[in-house]
Image (tube, grey):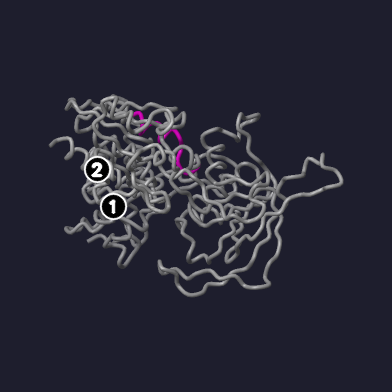
């Protein structure tokens, strides 16, 4: 019997000193030989615990078994029975806390690199298969999808495969939602997202961009147009702020704005239509994946020094460990157990024409310590009196979460929401309006791509059962 390889095969990456200055993808992907060797680590457990950790229930042992036999297209077809976005999930899903956390091999050794294998299979398919897919026969029913992010695209994909006429309405000029405006190119290339969207179009999904539901069209008008059900997957695009002095200064961005300008509006180009501050010293407030994305983007835009300011310790940092390690390798400075109390600006009352007036010059910070656990079990950060100090900053990026935009709620009678603005749904994704379903960040607030996809799948199943009656 061949001895088990205890550690998962390393993902080849660009060198930190190189990638910190370009927007090319950091992770380079497995070669065929590495993928096969990693697949051979799978124990093919009969009870398949890894599947229970996947929000979209991919048959993981089965697709890995195809890789062992070098049947990569078979592996891809197995994945796409459950997932409409395999190349995306293989890159940005937190497998370490989901499917890989359930891996039996992980009890004694490192778990199988499931996400890396999923990426390999999807990239192999996209590189070798250029033919169009077979459109399913129409069942005569029409469904509208609001938002082209992961939940909307997943719901659309599941429904179109069952023969539904599906139209996706996207507020921005490019489909993909947070996948294109929120996640940087070096983590998720836009061509990957475009290819996944194109596959759905080939199946028959119609994508209408520059349509703001709640303004261009309302939910009620969609029903008047002949749609029999609506899925709301509009995300959580309303940024949160700390409400501290100085947040209105020039050079203060929400992470949403900063990343959208860079990712979608191409602000890194010379003379862009939507410019962004480049260079200098950048401070990013927050500790999640979005904070890591903003910090690493600022570095690639030419920042001289980038700091992450987070009120808890490294152990409580919510970002994926891989993203934190990449940020550290690239030279991002982590200011932990720290919290801003004021953003400082330049003032020169003797010369109001001074171009620096109104711009950020720094931030006043207070040191923190961890106290008793909060309602979620995390130790609550507590300010240390008298520990305030100042840091220099030419740009401050707030990455402390987002909330659902109230536009749809305010234009849709009878749609119930919770105190945070999230749409209230039952276990099937049904809202308080008959025929209206919702999922993803529009319901939960900012969460993971794969959890949004899971919500899209749940709603698609419920919509199918509703319209099949």
Q: Which residue is mark 1?
A: 54
Question: In the image shown, does 281 or 71 lie closer to the viewer?
Answer: 281
Q: Position of residue 331 (x, y in %)?
A: 61, 54
Image point 65% across, 43% down: which residue?
A: 302
Check the picture and name the quadrant holding the C terminus.
Answer: top left
What predominant SS class does the magenta segment belong to? Answer: helix
What are the residue bounds of the magenta stretch?
186-198
**SS class of the residue under badge 1?**
loop
Dot 1 alpha-carbon crowd within 10 angstroms: few under 14, some 14 to 19, many 20 or more = many
Residue 119 occupies which quadrant of the picture? top left
Residue that numbered label 2 is attached to: 82
Q: Position of residue 114 (x, y in %)?
A: 32, 51
Residue at 25% x, 51% y is: 427
Residue at 85% in and 43% down: 351
Task: Specify the quadrant that holds the N terminus.
Answer: bottom left
Q: Relative to 228, is 458 above or below?
A: below
Asked if labels 1 and 2 touch by Cβ distance under 8 angstroms, the answer is yes
Is residue 353 magenta-colored?
no
**The quadrant where residue 266 appears:** top right
Q: Is residue 217 above or below residue 380?
A: above
């Amino acid at each position: 019997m061949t001895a088990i390889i205890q550690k998962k095969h390393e993902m080849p990456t660009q060198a930190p000193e190189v990638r910190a200055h370009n927007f090319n993808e950091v992770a380079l992907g497995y070669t065929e030989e590495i993928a096969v060797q990693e697949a051979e680590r799978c124990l093919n457990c009969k009870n398949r615990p890894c599947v229970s950790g996947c929000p979209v229930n991919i048959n993981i042992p089965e697709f890995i078994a195809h890789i062992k036999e070098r049947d990569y297209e078979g592996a891809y077809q197995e994945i796409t029975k459950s997932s409409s976005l395999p190349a995306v999930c293989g890159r940005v899903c937190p497998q370490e806390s989901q499917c890989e956390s359930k891996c039996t091999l992980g009890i004694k050794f490192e778990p199988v690199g499931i996400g890396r294998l999923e990426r390999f299979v999807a990239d192999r398919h996209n590189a070798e298969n250029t033919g169009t897919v077979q459109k399913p026969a129409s069942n005569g029913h029409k469904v509208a999808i609001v938002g082209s992010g992961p939940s909307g695209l997943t719901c659309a994909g599941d429904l179109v495969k069952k023969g539904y006429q599906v139209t996706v309405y996207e507020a921005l000029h490019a489909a993909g939602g947070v996948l294109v405006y929120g996640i940087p190119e070096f983590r998720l290339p836009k061509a990957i997202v475009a290819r996944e969207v194109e596959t759905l179009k080939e199946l028959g999904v119609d994508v209408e961009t520059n349509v703001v539901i709640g303004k261009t069209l309302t939910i009620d008008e969609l029903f008047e147009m002949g749609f029999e059900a609506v899925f709301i997957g509009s995300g959580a695009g309303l940024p949160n702020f700390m409400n501290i002095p100085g947040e209105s200064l020039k050079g203060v961005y929400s992470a949403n704005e900063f990343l959208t300008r860079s990712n979608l509006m191409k602000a890194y180009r010379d003379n862009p239509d939507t410019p962004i501050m480049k260079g200098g010293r950048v401070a990013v407030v927050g500790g999640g994946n979005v904070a890591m994305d903003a910090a690493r983007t600022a570095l690639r835009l030419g920042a001289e020094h980038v700091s992450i300011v987070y009120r808890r310790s490294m152990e409580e940092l919510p970002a994926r460990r891989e993203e934190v390690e990449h940020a550290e390798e690239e030279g991002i400075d982590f200011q932990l157990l720290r919290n801003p109390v004021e953003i400082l600006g330049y003032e020169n009352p003797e010369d109001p024409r001074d171009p620096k007036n109104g711009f950020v010059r720094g931030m006043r910070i207070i040191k923190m310590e961890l106290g008793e656990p909060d309602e979620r079990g995390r130790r609550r950060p507590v300010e240390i009196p008298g520990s305030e100090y100042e840091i220099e900053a030419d740009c401050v990026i707030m990455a402390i979460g987002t909330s659902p935009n109230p536009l749809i709620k305010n234009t849709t009678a009878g749609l119930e929401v919770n105190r945070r603005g999230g749409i209230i749904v039952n276990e099937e994704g049904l809202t308080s309006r008959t025929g209206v379903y919702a999922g993803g960040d529009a319901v939960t607030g900012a969460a993971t791509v794969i959890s949004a996809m899971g919500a899209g799948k749940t709603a698609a199943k419920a919509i199918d059962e509703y319209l099949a009656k």
